[in-house]
Amino acid sequence: MPHDTPLIATIVAGLGLAFVFGALANRFRIPPLVGYLVAGVLVGPNTPGFVADAGLANELAEIGVILLMFGVGLHFSLKDLLSVRAIAVPGAIVQIGFATALGAGLSWMLGWSMGAGLVFGLALSVASTVVLLRALQERRMIETERGRIAVGWLIVEDLAMVLALVLLPALAGVLGGQEQADAHASGLLSLPVTYGIWGVVGMTLAKVAAFVVVMLVVGRRVIPWILHYVAHTGSRELFRLAVLAIALGVAFGAAKLFGVSLALGAFFAGMIMSESELSHRAAEESLPLRDAFSVLFFVSVGMLFDPFSLLSNGLPILATLAIIIIGKSLAAFVIVRAFGYPLTTALMISASLAQIGEFSFILAELGVGLKLLPEQGRDLVLAGAILSIVLNPLMFLALDWMKPWLDARAARKETPDDAKPVGPATAPGQVASVAAATKGEDDPPPRTTSANHTILIGYGRVGNLVGAALKQAALPFLVIEDGDKTLARLKADGVETISGNAANSEVFAAANPEGASRLILAIPNAFEAGQIVLRARAANPGINVIARAHSDAEVEHLKGLGADTVIMGEREIARGIVEEVLGQKPEAAEPSAA
């Protein structure tokens, strides 16, 4: 019976309803995250029907937080941040300060304490990593200047929130909350706290510094060594287990030995692991579990939300939403324009940041746990997050609607500069660069001029070998790929590339499939490959399609959709072994689905 197995009941109800409502949200082009939150509301104590075990949900949510922060650290790129540091660092700091001040002002009007205002304002100041990255990926803007600024801005916000998660427990008593008993007297650096606010801050930062030193000196050597050792065993199961054990073990050790948060420990574990050559594989192997527990995290957050607060707190919710959508966006717009960036860049970054998400939930829950933030404040944060995430796609649609006007405005601005004489240090190059920055980034990728060429989809372990062979044979080809580092390497090697997902019709059309002679699908996802095969056959019935598969079912699936040749990896391995043993090609062996 479900009541006899609360853990199973909580996981099944959480994941099952999250799938249903996530699929519905996706159907209406709303981030699935909204569906997960709604699922949590339905299994929470504030709605009738089945009620999941709140204690177990919180435990599962803690694992979700660890894996979320591990993922943030795993994708943390100091290089990307440094490339846009001139705008991202001061811009994010000023915007966080402005949004925090607005949140503190609203909390003062509601009669809350100073500590509540600080936590509430910070929770409203940070955008959702999940929502922002998805919006940029859908518009193929990750590699553009605007995309890099938005991602850099997001990294600074994330780092600021990590610092807040570290300092809030230490300062809870000073800010009027409940000081955690183990916040200062736990772990290796346990000392009695009798030094006032600066002593508290100093001791907390000393613990963090000790943890950082250990991670940079020891972790930087030990973690990559463990990954490489396990990778050489050839066991995918052990490698996946090693990644998860490192993420969870470092987070737990950081909390128990140094008294710092689980979130910070997980972030540093991911950041150290990102320096390894195996980081990409680590990200792939940990992604399914990260996704599953992240969903449970959002479900647990939804369980805390009282939907009836939308009626009882109508005006405060509208004020909270206004801070998120108008206040934050206006601050970001003014900052970006003040740094001399074009209007379209300022508008895009404003739209990207006009929502809040996972860090806001973590901060709000921490604030309630420390008795800093009233439960009403948590409800306002949750309501503001749900509504802002739902409305965020509408802001991008508004930008798309404004695009013709913005392009015309940019063209009018460009004309006078072209008409008047300019010095060598100004106009032609500068006008061109401004025009490039204000136009074209949202347009479909430019169509290739290549003909009778090979389209190579994916440039991972398989695509890399195929591309090298095509290049050696002097066969013309282009690569469709969505990995930033891979694209940069290909461009440096002089290989023609198209950035994006080939399953996107506009991206695939840019490769000129009508004029191509061959399509090679080097991606491992058979379902996505099937969509591309269908699109290729519709554009060019005579194109030769070669794909890869991992099972007989995938071979049949791709062959049924129109692939000419499907290579199954396991079959080719067997063919190679037989050839090595017999000293000749196994003519009698089963063909590779050609």
Image (tube, rainbow, N blue to C red):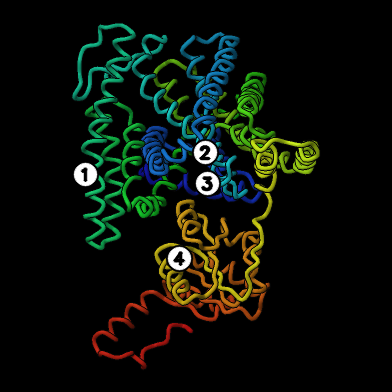
- In-front residue for pair 430/287: 430
Q: Gap in Å between the C-alphas at discs 3 and 4?
A: 29 Å
Q: Which kind of residue does numbered mark 1 sit on?
A: Val
Q: Residue at x 31, y 54 (%)?
A: 240
- Residue 570 x, y percent position in the rendering: 36, 75
Which numbered disc covers residue 222? 1
Instruction: Say which residue label 3 marks.
Output: 17
Q: Which kind of residue does numbered mark 2 sit on?
A: Val
N-term-proximal mark, 3 vs 2 = 3
Q: Gap in Å between the C-alphas at discs 2 and 4?
A: 28 Å
Label 4: state its secondary structure: loop
Q: Gap in Å between the C-alphas at discs 3 and 2?
A: 31 Å
- In-front residue for pair 165/199: 199
- In-front residue for pair 244/441: 441
Instruction: Say which residue label 2 marks.
Output: 151
Q: Residue at x 54, y 43 (%)?
A: 133
Q: Nearer the viewer, mark 1 or mark 4?
A: 1
Instruction: Say which residue label 4 marks.
Output: 524
Label 2: state its secondary structure: helix
Q: Gap in Å between the C-alphas at discs 1 and 4?
A: 31 Å
Q: Quadrant of residue 210?
A: top left
N-term-proximal mark, 1 vs 4 = 1
Q: Nearer the viewer, mark 3 or mark 2?
A: 2
- Residue 388 x, y percent position in the rendering: 62, 33
> In the image, is 270 to the left or to the right of 120?
left
N-term-proximal mark, 3 vs 4 = 3
